[in-house]
Amino acid sequence: MDIVYIRDLRIDAVIGIYEWEQRIQQQISVNIEMGWDNRPAAGSDDIKDTLNYKEAANIVKALVAKSEFKLVEALAEHIAELLLEKMNIPWIRVTLGKPMAVTNSQEVGVSIERTREIK
């Protein structure tokens, strides 16, 4: 399986467990790896055969804009579920980082992998 990725997508989000965090926006960093077969696109050289990473980024931005999660774990899970469904991909890894959430650290966060359930 090939991988289509988005690295260091910076988005302002309402996220955090503290009351003051629920009143402000903080920048998060989202990295996404999506399983995809790139052979059809490589053969046709046509965008209609690709996994549209711009569309994926817009889906994530729209989700974050309307959400107010307390935990990065919950937001990462929702991102994975939404992209698996909307982009019809078989596998995804979402890494979500919250810069400066811990004193003297650059970033903390989670990385999750999910697969689409075939029904």
Image (cartoon, rainbow, N blue to C red):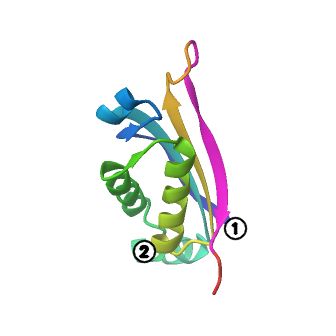
Query: Which residue in the protein does label 2 denote?
Result: 46
Identity, as a three-letter code, of the amino acid under mark 1: Met
Residue drawn 62% across the image and 73% down it: 116
Query: Which residue in the protein does label 1 denote?
Result: 1
Query: Which mark's residue is nearer the viewer, 1 or 2?
Result: 1
The secondary structure that dominates the magenta segment is strand
| Quadrant the C terminus occupies | bottom right
Give the total of numbered labels.
2
Which one is nearer the viewer's eye here, 48 or 15? 15
| Res 18 quadrant in image | top left
Which one is nearer the viewer's eye here, 22 or 73? 22
Residue sitting farthest toward the bottom: 119
| Res 52 quadrant in image | bottom left
> Which range of residues does the magenta coloring cover?
104-116
Identity, as a three-letter code, of the amino acid under mark 2: Asp
Which one is nearer the viewer's eye here, 93 or 70? 70
| Quadrant the N terminus occupies | bottom right
Residue drawn 42% across the image and 74% down it: 46
Residue 6, above or below 11? below
Residue 79 percent location from the top left of the image:
49, 57
